[in-house]
């Protein structure tokens, strides 16, 4: 059995600079690990105010950007962890998730938390994906359409 292979840190264009010692995405072999995405624009400003649906859309847009930077899409996501300040917002967030994931259903964990990195943030999502195809040489191919 072969190991995971080369580990690559990916800085994602259009994402705010990390505020701590981490990177947005790590690709290791055919796996993609996406750090928690929040409702921030490229300058790090919160998008959506106190509207969990608007924040969830921005989070999914950021997640889409991160996945694409690694050569993946929502169809390749195997696992998400969702952090919500109010678990009562679950159905609202699920409606947004369905818009982005379509028929694909990743394994999922939902955790209600008292606070995120900033008080105005309502939701954060991290993800693990498997790249659609890896050639024999370990080079990643473009994601499925």
Image: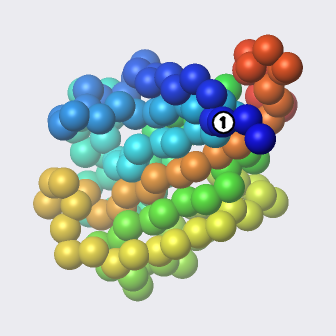
In the rendered view, tell whether residue 103 sits above or below residue 65. Answer: below
Does any portion of residue 26 appear in the rendered image?
yes
Q: Residue at x 74, y 19 (%)?
A: 138
In the rendered view, tell whether residue 141 sits above or below residue 132. Answer: above
- Give residue 32's quadrant in the image: top right
Image x and y of residue 107, in percent: 65, 67
* Outermost residue to the bottom: 88
67 with respect to 136 (left or right) = left
Image x and y of residue 97, in percent: 60, 60
* Outermost residue to the left: 119
Few, some or many residues within 10 Å of mark 1 (<14, 14–19, 20+): few
Q: Residue at x 29, y 29 (%)?
A: 16
The residue at which mark 1 appears reads as 3
| Frontmost residue, 56 versus 74 | 74
Image x and y of residue 40, in percent: 31, 41
Q: Residue at x 37, y 57 (%)?
A: 124
């Amino acid at each position: 059995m072969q190991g995971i292979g080369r580990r690559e840190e990916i800085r994602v264009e259009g994402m705010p600079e990390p505020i701590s010692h981490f990177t947005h995405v790590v690709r290791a072999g055919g796996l993609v690990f996406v750090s928690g995405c929040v409702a921030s624009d490229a300058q790090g400003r919160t998008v959506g105010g106190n509207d969990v649906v608007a924040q969830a859309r921005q989070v999914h847009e950021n997640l889409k950007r991160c996945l694409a930077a690694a050569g993946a899409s929502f169809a390749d996501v195997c696992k998400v962890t969702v952090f919500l300040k109010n678990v009562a917002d679950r159905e609202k967030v699920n409606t947004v998730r369905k818009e982005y994931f379509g028929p694909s259903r990743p394994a999922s964990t939902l955790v209600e938390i008292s606070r995120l990195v900033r008080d105005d943030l309502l939701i954060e999502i991290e993800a693990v994906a498997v790249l659609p195809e890896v050639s024999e040489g370990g080079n990643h191919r473009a994601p499925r359409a």
